[in-house]
Amino acid sequence: MYRVEFKEHFDILKAKLVAFKELPGKYDAQLEEYLKWSAHVSQIYREDIADYMCNELLTILQQYYSVLNPALRLSMVTSLRIMRGKDVVAPSVVLPVLLKLFRCDDKTLRRFLHSVIISDLKKLNKNAKVVNINRRL
């Protein structure tokens, strides 16, 4: 993807997120697609996407987790998981928010969160224990 096309799509995503914050309970299929797109290209355009998307998604999930549409909430968590898998986002930033999401009344989300958190902790502690992250959690 060329840089100009990326900038156009990224600007659309930013506008969608601003509009989404006004009505966080509303489902937006196009926003869901843009979230997945941004997660998949986050490693290529790390300097443009990483900080903005991580901060926006974590802020939205922390503030509006109880009123978000379940499908959109799951796609936000999936986007964070993809960015975490590409090592774009630090585990010490993502894991506390994912643990907070266990308060939701969404059983499929809790199952998904459980598998994501366990697999991430296993991967982190595979070669040597990461004491500072383990203590924080």
Image (spheres, grey):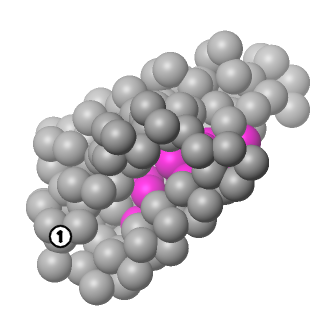
**Magenta-colored stretch includes residue 80:** yes
Q: Badge 1: how crowded within 10 Å, few (<14), some, or many (20+)?
A: some
Please give left or right for residue 108 compared with residue 67 in the image: right
Residue 124, percent from left and from top: 62, 48
Above or below, 106 against 24 in this view is below
Q: Residue at x 47, y 22 (%)?
A: 52
Please give left or right for residue 57 compared with residue 18 in the image: right
Quick check: can you spot residue 25? no
Quadrant of the frame with the N terminus: top right
Residue 106, percent from left and from top: 24, 79
**Of 12 and 32, which appears nearest the observer?**
32
**Of 124 and 52, which appears nearest the observer?**
124
Q: Residue at x 38, y 27 (%)?
A: 55
**Residue bounds of the magenta highlight:** 74-86
**Of 100 and 29, which appears nearest the observer?**
100
Single out the residue that lies furthest toward the right: 2
Quick check: can you spot residue 46? yes
Above or below, 62 against 26 in this view is above
Q: Report the residue marked by disc 1.
A: 104
Q: Residue at x 48, y 37 (%)?
A: 131
